[in-house]
Image (cartoon, helix red, strand yellow):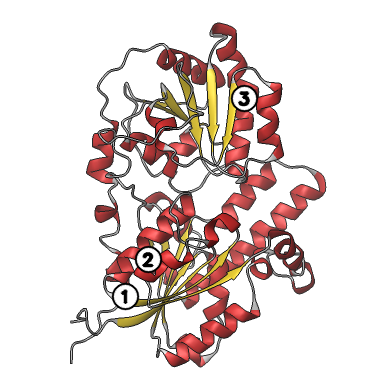
Amino acid sequence: MTTALSKEPLLFLCHRIPFPPNKGDKIRSFNILKKLSEQYDVHLGCFIDDRFDKKYASALTKYCASVFHLDQHKTFAKLKGLSGFLTNKPITLPYYFDKRMQQWTNRTIAQQKIKKVFIYSSSMAQYVQGNSEQYQKLERVIDFVDIDSDKWRQYANKKTGIAKWFFNREYKLLAQEEQTICAQFTHSLFVSPDEAQLFRHQQPQSQQGKVHGLLNGVDVNFFNPEVSFSKEQLVPKQPFISFTGAMDYWANVDAVLWFVEQVWPLIIAEQPNAILCIVGGNPSNDVKALAKNHQGIVVTGRVHDVRPFIEQAQCVIAPLQIARGIQNKVLEAMALNKAIVVTTMAMEGINAQPSDGVVITDDKQTYAQACLALLNAQPKTLANRQWILEHFTWQQTLQPLMNYFSVKESH
């Protein structure tokens, strides 16, 4: 049995610093890191792609025996990614490769006598992959989170010409890479049973037993309607609708563009004073333009506290047209017991049933009518928070995590 005084070392590689837990992938990676740190001395290697996050690196020492991080400049990383065309690799691999990360990984494995590795995101598997005996003897568990290759397939379906060819190429090469990783690693984890099942069916029968769902959770103490929140100046005083998420992430950008083009005119036609708050950091130029070109739209950019924009909204929308896995934005809104209007894709893996507080539709007319009804609705008691408490606390969802590593024997 491992004791607090003799924790076994574990290498944790992550494509983005897992702190602060303020966006989808970082929320999951942080909570997994926190859980693993209860039993292991974690040696963390990660990239920092947002200057805002750099000041938080020291906070990770609370959970890690050591932390190694590298700045990632997105423009340079994109140029590196293009080298994949020369090596017939998916661009994702060179995008996330840095020889300094490789050197640190090899040195840490040797010096710390690492036997267990946790990889977060398929792009980081390359640091402990291949036929080297040093890597083959490791117990390697990977959290793919989503089937990344399938996102590229979805992107390709929305494109034409050279863009369609480009996205299809990435989809096919990444799918091959995912299959290779699954074959080499001890276990492959995904964000939901649905996602795991889809990936499982894509693998040879000999590998299917390695594939598991590990649900996302939500911090129900933080996203709690009973606590008081900070004052946010940009929160509208009149009834409004909210969308929350990283606004430089293509699936989120695509979602709000679809909503504003297809649904918002139907809402404004009936309720000219309606307001839509698009809340999240690094809004793209397309998102910023929505506030200039459309009536009633507020683009906040990064906010100190997202909760007031959820808790004070009449409803929260998640009109995703491209999605994989579980949407944290939906979990957070439900934890705050807010009414939600979501597409079928946005509800995947959460599987809450339609009710007074849950509308699931892919039809723009139905979407608009649901939002209008909730904009004008009187407050009522909803069951959304109860669904989260019963199914999606981190304590519940991460319970199986330790089972994917063999237990160190006591001496």
Residue at image mark 1: 405
Please provide percent x and percent y for residue 314: 41, 21
Quadrant (top left, top right, bottom left, bottom right) of the C terminus: bottom left
Give the mark, 3 or 1, whose residue is nearer the N terminus. Answer: 3
Q: Amino acid at mark 1?
A: Phe
Rounded to the nearest angstrom, the CA distance separating label 3 from label 1 is: 46 Å
SS of the residue under disc 1: loop
Q: Nearer the viewer, mark 2 or mark 3?
A: 2
Give the mark, 2 or 1, whose residue is nearer the N terminus. Answer: 2
Give the mark, 2 or 3, whose residue is nearer the N terminus. Answer: 2
Q: Residue at x 21, y 81 (%)?
A: 2
Residue at image mark 2: 33
Q: Nearer the viewer, mark 2 or mark 1?
A: 2
The foreground one among 373 and 153 is 373
Residue at image mark 3: 260
Q: Nearer the viewer, mark 3 or mark 1?
A: 3
SS of the residue under disc 2: helix
Quadrant for residue 306, please give it.
Answer: top left
Please provide percent x and percent y for residue 408: 25, 84
Q: Residue at x 32, y 21 (%)?
A: 356
What is the crowding at mark 3: few (fewer than 14 residues within 10 Å), some, or many (at least 20)?
some
What is the crowding at mark 1: few (fewer than 14 residues within 10 Å), some, or many (at least 20)?
some
Outermost residue to the right:
162
Q: Are marks 3 and 1 in contact (CB under 8 Å)?
A: no
Please provide percent x and percent y for residue 282: 61, 44
Whether 280 is drawn above or below 15: the answer is above
Circle on res. 340:
none
Q: Amino acid at mark 3?
A: Val
- Residue 63 appears in the figure: no
